[in-house]
Amino acid sequence: MPTRRHPGTFFIVPAVVFVVAMVLFPVGYTAWLSLHEWSGSAVRSPRWVGIGNYAELLTQDPRFGYAVLRTFFFTAIAVPLEIVLGLAIALLISEKFRGQHLAKALILLPMVATPVAIGMAWLLILEPNIGPINTLLRSWHLPPQPFLGSGRQALLCLIAVDVWQWTPMMALILVAGLATLPGEPFEAARVDGAGPWQRFYHLTLPLLMPTIVTAMLLRSIEALKTFDIIYTMTRGGSDYSSETMNIYGYVQSFEYFALGKASSLLTVFFALVLGVSLILIEVRKRWGTAVA
Amino acid sequence: MKLRSTRLIGILAAVCALANGGCRKTESSAPTPGASKKFAGKQLNIILANHPWSEALAPMLEDFKKTTGMELTISHYPEDQLSQKLQIGLTAGSNRADVFMLRPLQEARQFAENHWLADLLPHAQSDKDWNWSDFQEAARDTVTFDKAVYGVPVVTEREMVYYRKDLFDKAGLKPPATLEELKAAAAKLNDPANAVAGIVMRGQRAPSVTQFSSFLYSFGGDWIRDGKSLLDSPQALTAYKFYGGLLKNYGPQGALNMSWPQGLAVFQRGKAAMWIDADVFYPNLIDPAKSTVTTTVGFAPFPLGPAGAKNYNVTSWALGINESSPEKAGAAWEFVQWATSAPVVMALQQKGVPGARLSVWNSPDGLKGFPEAYAKVIQIQVARGVGHDRPRVIKVGAARDIVGEPVVTAIQGGDVEASVKKAHEQFNAFLLQDK
């Protein structure tokens, strides 16, 4: 037995080294820095402030509280929409029809474009004065909208872009899930006279649940961390109305040079994302299996 | 191949050293003043912003390399990424950047505070041919703090009015000479039915601060006096109300999400009668591939306010040297000295990049690169104005978010007085910490 265990240990060494260097060290360093105050100076080393940064974030900084709420609001609206739309698209393109391959390829386009390019393109589309959407609205005699230039609409616009960008990935995962469903229950249901809606509600949905929950888990973690489209389109504006935790962390470190405070913010953020992931993994254990 | 050429350069360098720099004059026709083979074979890493200055300099670099025998590795970044890239590299104590572009008013003090920038004063004093006193006083002032010089000014800019000559003529208006006339013109030309705004300016919180600054100064206000916030002055309140009011009443849709790219786009597409922003953007307006107002755009100096002619006149970009670069007193300075020498600045300015040297501005050749109407305005504005367009503090980013807030409130039509009061208190608290 020991001879067999030995090479096993040897083979996992690269993975362990990788995890330590690329995951544990940055996380540990960030946690360490979060207890200090530092502007990046080459001569003045970080100054110990204990939990001062955390206390400041939680008690004296209203921007932080709002950023937390916005981060969760963004995810809570975007991900369910992506799942519902993704499921609808998945069901449609799983049916056999002419041009099916072309349709699949077209639907994937938003996902393969680079996020910054997407941000720039939507910035133009949503431009209130020269953008095509307001030009259309004007030509239908509807009032033009400020979109990203409005504290009320900016975050909603960003959610819409996120939905546009990531629904295809949901559809893709769900198409794969649909393809693995067993055929027999559907045949039996058809023989018993179940209609399409009944088959969807009583068979497809429960059988697909593990895939849906997994997709939701993956996407939620990513959605909480969204940075690129928000940074390119609004930088957290208008009037902080789309400033999520990630954006605020960026501002603290690269615009305010407050590396300690930024680290404490990111540590809180890390804990929150980890917490949400654990909850979702638990949900997956409970709901994601053994339905059929 | 590379090895061989390096060796060849080495031999050449040795020959030159023996000849006591005698081969300098015979080498090249491009401007390479003062450049010698002293540092032949040295390798320099240079980090530049994507900016007309770097674009105009690029074709001259080959001659510089040939003349000096130095090797240059140059990387370009958009301005925000540049700042971020420098911060990461310099925080890590890296000496991979020897020379880099930086924004003196935005990040230089923090960089200096962090000991990332070499003090160039000894060079400025000793290098008489290069002539530090030929740089505009405001520009020298911008890069000097605590009696050290942290960069050499390469690009200067001022706030100006871009206006539509056709719309002004039709309405029988003259370009605004005072802030009152500016407001009247914006009101008269605002035409929401045809989706043409009276005026477009920046409305995003932090970006708007620099363009608001000329308004603040023109009404007689400023940011700081003796280390205390001056935002509670009646002049500041008037200026905030005026700037925000212009955008609220006569501005385009969605002004709150506008910085210069958005304002530029709106004006380029003929959707505004006036655009007030930095004077460096004019090439984008007269380029037929980008603009629909190439022939109708007019240029005017920043209007006079109750306190007189107080446009900002600042150094927006400088070249700095990394404090931990082994070449900081050698090859790195050689490059900076060349890139900021009078003949190079002249060549760059003839390509339309406004520099900081008085001798270039005072020579008719120095104005050749600009359209005539534009050159007239810029010449007026170079000779006057205020040398800062944002609070001169260490953590500029945080300060801009504080002092920009009342601009946002004013555009939204909120309670400007309350917002200014809050900003004043926050700014005072900030100034106590910003040391």
Image: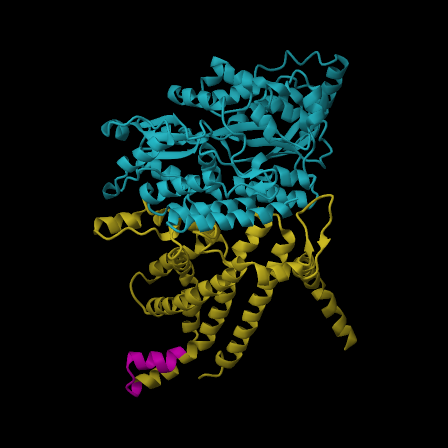
Q: Colour of chain B?
A: cyan
Q: Residue at x 64, y 58 (%)?
A: A53
Could you say where residue A45 lies in the image, as x and y percent from the top left? 73, 49
- Magenta region includes residue A197: yes
| Figure colour scheme | by chain
Q: Nearer the viewer, residue B68 or B131?
A: B131
Can the viewer see residue B202?
yes
Q: Nearer the viewer, residue B83 or A120?
A: B83
Q: Colour of chain A?
A: yellow
- Above or below: residue B406 compared with residue A94: above
> Which quadrant of the structure image shows residue A84?
bottom left
Identity of the residue furthest to the front in this view: B234
- Magenta region includes residue B176: no
Q: Residue at x 48, y 45 (%)?
A: B404
> Which quadrant of the structure image shows residue A59?
bottom right
Could you say where residue B25 lies in the image, as x and y percent from the top left? 64, 12
Which corner quadrant holds the C terminus of chain A?
bottom left
Q: Nearer the viewer, residue B250 or A220?
A: B250
Which corner quadrant holds the N terminus of chain A?
bottom right
Identity of the residue furthest to the right in this view: A2
- Above or below: residue B199 compared with residue B349: below
The secondary structure making up most of the magenta span is helix
Could you say where residue B398 lies in the image, as x and y percent from the top left? 56, 47
- Above or below: residue A65 compared with residue B102: below
> Which quadrant of the structure image shows residue B319?
top right
Could you say where residue A83 lies in the image, as x and y percent from the top left? 41, 68
Q: Nearer the viewer, residue B325 or B11?
A: B325
Can the viewer see residue B6?
no
Q: Point out the stretch of residues depicted in magenta.
A: A191-205
